[in-house]
Image: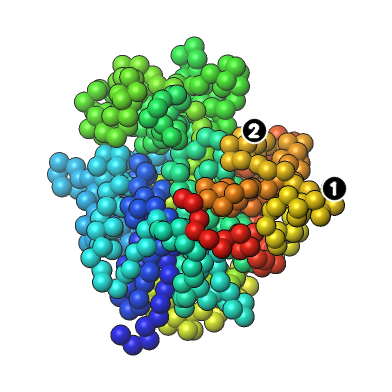
Amino acid sequence: MSNTKHILVVGSGIAGLIAALELSRQHAVTLVTKAVLAESNTRWAQGGIAAVMFSDDAVADHIADTLVAGAGLCNPNAVNVLCTEGPDRIRDLIRLGVAFDHTPDGQLARGLEAAHSKARVLHAGGDATGLTVETALVLAVRHQPNISVLEHTFALDLVLQNGAVAGLEIIDSEGLPRTIDADAIVLASGGAGHLYLHTTNPSVATGDGVAMALRAGAQVADLEFYQFHPTALATASSLDSSPFLISEAVRGEGAVLLDASGSRFMQHIHPSAELAPRDIVARGIASQMADQQGLPVLLDATAKSADFLAARFPTIDAATRARNLDWSRNPIPITPAAHYWMGGIRTDLHGRTSIPGLYAVGEVACTGVHGANRLASNSLLESLTFAWRCAHLLLDDTTSATSSEASALSSLEGAALPLRRQEPEQTEAFTPEARLRQPAEARTTPIDRLSLQTLMWTHVGIERNATDLRAALHTLNRSHVEGITIHDLETRNLLDLARVLVTAALAREESRGAHFRTDFPEPSAAFQHSLTYTQPARTSPTHDILSETVPC
């Protein structure tokens, strides 16, 4: 193949798999994933993919719905790309073998979800859309000879030469650190739900890609906007490593929310009641739970028959029954949980970041397409659409593509704000001797993941205020993570991200979308723009301590 490059793709959700498949048309691709190939946030997506595939719908309506949900902060150009190009990308998935559900007359089946003006959400396997998509794409990747897959491989840090990406430091499946050279790197490593005590995300969602990019000096944006899904199952079960998600589509089919006494409450909060934007529903539930001493609210789907629920939502039906709940007869307890990060590595509309040779797609990226609050079922569509665009930019000409990142980003709105390096300077191993050499006010104490998640949940959750945010930042700035297991390295990434998320939340003195400040409860025209941050590229704190095999 002429002009063949070696491109690393990090992450194996829909964004990483699509990028790898498209890039392999011309380039040699190595796909790095820290679990098995099929494990990602995509696998657990229930609701579906929103796209205009029907004659009674219009791209202009999908655009309008996305802009409204984004609360005045969406990048209109990104939204136009998403909604205009999305239908063709859905057709690509069908050609790749994704079996979407159909109606008895052979038409694509579709559902309605919150804040959509039309029923446009395609689904597969009832409520197993993500699993169906992931399975088809994994099969396609396995059969592509130009793609090498490295499973159980942890992406540690980016390697830069003269300010541009030159490779990736990894810990391989044997626990050995090594470096892989690359002409370009596409980060598709997903979000960071495990910043929070309660999350719908699988265990792999620890924000590694954003943390690596931040350490390398990349611009990041909109980090204060973390979406909490309104309805996660509120049960204590040995089956639950994370709260089990109850899809938005359940409310789209008519399920309603009840307080502890069995009365509806959302119609008193928003005209769309249970189908209001996610941030409004999540806050409504949190407020109601506070009024009833923390007891979960109830999701009532009993207006639907047991046969309907089992056929339309087989995964949820099986999960509820495994927990001895019969949701066809009785309402089920639910609570909000951290779900999706609107912020991430700042990119243009082709995935280019502020670092030459580095690209980002999917939840790890911030194109501005979601604004302050993602519209339901736009996430898989975003990953699909922008991963395709990124790959085809690189297919056109890798050399010219990687030479224009800075000019591409300079056209985006908002200047990058510098982040002060957190004390202490993380340039040496965190040994007791090293800490004693630091000034007393700069010394740090160990923090474990549970403590970090609890701090973020209680101080930087659905509702925020300056007092809690400052207290959280004080603790985070004086904390460090000990140990060199993969779990420790993930927690260190979460700590890095928590600091910048809280910094951004403190700076945004307003309420907008998923960011709600009780001390600034209204949106402000002064903040109708993204807050973008960067910090000088620095050596990862792992560099000095990774000289031997890393315990997994």
- Quarter holding the N terminus is bottom left
| Vertical arrangement, residue 56 with respect to residue 210, above or below | above
420 to the left or right of 375: right
| Marking on residue 162 | none
- Identified at 43% across, 61% down, the residue is 172
The residue where tag 1 is placed is 440
In the picture, residue 471 is in which quadrant? top right
Categorize mark 1 by other alpha carbons within 10 Å: few (<14), some (14-19), many (20+): few
Q: Amino acid at mark 2?
A: Thr
Disc 2 secondary structure class: helix
Q: Are marks 1 and 2 in contact (CB under 8 Å)?
A: no
Q: Which residue is mark 2?
A: 458
* Helix, strand or loop status at disc 1: helix
- Name the mark nearer the viewer: 1 or 2: 1
In-image side of 407 versus 375 (left or right) = right
Circle 2 residues within 10 Å: few <14, some 14–19, many ≥20: some
Residue 470, quarter of the rendered image: top right
Residue 128 visible in image: yes
Q: Residue furthest left?
A: 105
Q: Give the CA separation, mark 1 to mark 2.
A: 28 Å
Q: Residue at x 14, y 44 (%)?
A: 105
Say which amino acid is labelled 1: Ala
Provide residue 303's location: percent of width, then percent of height. Answer: 31, 21
- Toward which corner of the image does residue 124 lie, by quadrant? top left
Q: Nearer the viewer, residue 242 or 253?
A: 242
